Image: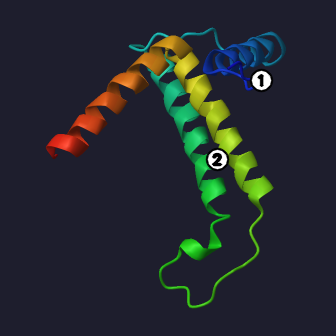
Amino acid sequence: MVSDSPTLRDMFDAQASFMQLLREKRGFPAFPVDLRSKDGQRLLKDTAHSAMDELHEALQHLKNSKAHRATEVVDFDRQKYVEELVDHLHYYVELCILSGISADELHAAYADKDSVNRIRIHEGY
């Protein structure tokens, strides 16, 4: 079955294209960065912090997550929640690209770790 949904590779390509536009228009650094360099590591750390900020913004929409809350908030802006998760994903993919990690490498590492996690469930951890 063929899906109309973008693949992980499509998402990486779109993000790399956006990063290239940032290079041309805003002086964004060349990528991938040297993972051993001070400048490269600073950029990776800044990008990771931006990703975490977006994830925190998403979590702010989860009003019923507080254990001490006595009332239940029924309003939930799913669209805003998803938007913040997408912002997080953009930064995460950017972090991978800056690090020189391709969509295929990430997918393979994900599959490997998924196998390890499943074995841990069956055999104990």
Q: Are marks 1 and 2 in contact (CB under 8 Å)?
A: no
> Can residue 28 be seen?
no
The answer to which of 71 and 123 lies nearer the viewer is 123
Position in image of residue 92 (x %, y %)? 57, 31
Position in image of residue 122 (x %, y %)? 21, 42
Q: Is residue 25 above or below residue 75?
A: above
Residue positioned 47% across, 20% down in the render: 106
Residue positioned 46% across, 23% down in the render: 41
Q: Is residue 82 above or below residue 105?
A: below
- Return the residue found at the far bottom: 70
Position in image of residue 87 (x %, y %)? 70, 40
Label 1 CA crowd tier, 10 Å (few <14, some 14–19, many 20+): few
Residue positioned 24% across, 45% down in the render: 121
The answer to which of 58 and 52 lies nearer the viewer is 58
Does 62 sit left or right of 38 as displayed?
right
Q: Earlier in the sequence, mark 1 or mark 2?
A: 1
Query: What's the amino acid at mark 1?
Result: Asp
Query: What's the amino acid at mark 2?
Result: Glu
Element type at marker 1? loop
Q: CA distance from mark 1 to mark 2?
A: 27 Å
Does 109 sit left or right of 101 as displayed?
left
Instruction: Report which residue position mark 1 lands on.
Output: 4
- Return the residue found at the far front: 1
> Can residue 26 be seen?
yes
- Of badges 1 and 2, nearer the viewer stands 1
Figure quadrant of residue 16: top right
Figure quadrant of residue 80: bottom right
Q: Is residue 92 above or below residue 16?
A: below
Instruction: Report which residue position mark 2 lands on.
Output: 54
Label 2 CA crowd tier, 10 Å (few <14, some 14–19, many 20+): many
Residue positioned 61% across, 24% down in the render: 94
Q: Please tell me how many numbered marks the rendered image carries.
A: 2
